Amino acid sequence: MSTEPVRSLYIHVPFCAHKCEYCAFYSAPAAGDQIQRYVTALVREMELIAPECRPETVFFGGGTPSMLSLKQWETIVAAMHRLGLAGAPEWTVECNPATVSADKARLLRDAGVTRISMGVQSFDESLLDRLGRIHTRDQVFRSYDILRGAGFTHINIDLMFAIPGQSMALWDQTIDEALALQTEHLSCYEVIYEDDTPLYEQLKAGQFAVDEDLACDMYDRLIDRLADAGFRQYEIANFARESVSQLSTLNSQLPQNACRHNIAYWRGQDFHGLGPSASEYVRGLRSRNWANTNLYCDQLEKGRRAKEFAEALPPLARAGELAAFGLRMNAGWPFEEFRQRTGFDLRDQWRADLDELKNRGWAEETADSFRLTRSGLRFADSAGQQMLRTPEPTSR
């Protein structure tokens, strides 16, 4: 097993001013004392993993990382520099447009943050309200200008489509406004109705209906319009802007402005996950922290990580997961890369699955690789389920 340092680091900041109607991620209301306790515990968790982590990508997600105060960010950044966890070529922080200030933007940029991912979701006030977002459209443009003024040259904007009440005309307007900002990256997600979310309860109560045809049309419109604007889709929901010189590089598999951290997930690379509810995969062991901030802090205060569970998947089951994750990317899986990563050949254990996906028109195969088609990417979750391999029961 490799003893190379882990090259990707995810840090979950669980605090939100208000939980969005669609959100199923772990988050908690912001409380001053608890946030400070979390920051102290996070630094302790950093100290525990630092000896085996030299990140080339760092991603602060949430929750709302930009809710942390300047003093709290200073504490975290100082610890990262002390422990050798800073200085990654790609360091992303998620921000809510309502919680961006000039001082915070400058602090993050000076600390070495290279990339901001801003949760915009929509520019329409009524749709923002429907989603439970706390920001306004004006705050989006103000925050964007603040980030550019602080020196950020790589900004991602998150958008959502198929929102209840969203027409195609509104979606076109959203795309127009996003393109006008000249951002380097767009992440565009269809609304998913997760159990135990207010939006799911509204759907069950018959307050609105899901229009699958409109959702498909919105996705097609998105792909076509972004391609015309110089963006390259490299994963189901992710699009990166390319310059003319980048577009002329025919052998380039990925656009220069792609998110390297997420690519590490889709390609099955090891990553550490810190903070409440964070998952990680390190040296064949998959684990997750407790989705409870107080319990997380309790465990770190005792000098140990706050693991809810840890498991080692059998090699074939892990390979099946990687097959599913990798098919989310437009490039799919080069057969040799998959074999090197997993020890298995897609054309052997998954032969029948590859043929079925091709027969449906969802995939295409060459001598060197297998990938989903444009229509197949729309159903990548179903295709991925087909690639999974259930571990055999352990005998007792």
Image (cartoon, rainbow, N blue to C red):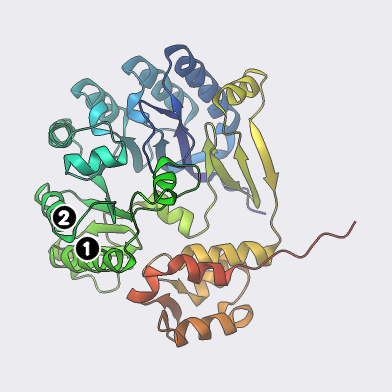
The quadrant in which the C terminus is found is bottom right
| Residue 269 vertical position relative to residue 73 in the rendered view, above or below | below
Q: How many marks?
A: 2
> Residue 334 versus residue 245: which sits nearer the camera?
334
Q: Residue at x 57, y 29 (%)?
A: 292
**On residue 175, which mark appears?**
2
| Residue 208 vertical position relative to residue 89 in the rendered view, above or below | below
Residue 50 seen in this snapshot: yes
Residue 153 seen in this snapshot: no
Amino acid type, label 2: Ile
| Residue, disc 1 | 222
Neighbour tally class for label 1: few under 14, some 14-19, many 20 plus, Cα within 10 Å: some
Q: Residue at x 51, y 23 (%)?
A: 43
Q: Residue at x 63, y 70 (%)?
A: 343
| Residue 100 vertical position relative to residue 34 in the rendered view, above or below | below
Residue 31 in which image quadrant: top left
Distance from label 2 to label 1 (Cα)?
8 Å
Q: Is residue 227 left or right of residue 371?
A: left
**On residue 125, which mark appears?**
none
x and y percentages locating residue 224 in the rendered image? 19, 69
Q: Is residue 65 left or right of residue 47?
A: left
Residue sticking out furthest to the left: 180
x and y percentages locating residue 7 in the rendered image? 49, 46
Marks 2 and 1 close (CB-CB < 8 Å): yes
x and y percentages locating residue 52 in the rendered image? 58, 38
Q: Is residue 14 left or right of residue 186?
A: right
Q: Which of disc 1 and disc 2 is earlier in sequence? A: 2
Describe the element under mark 2 as helix, strand or loop: helix
| Residue 294 vertical position relative to residue 283 in the rendered view, above or below | above
x and y percentages locating residue 354 in the rendered image? 52, 81
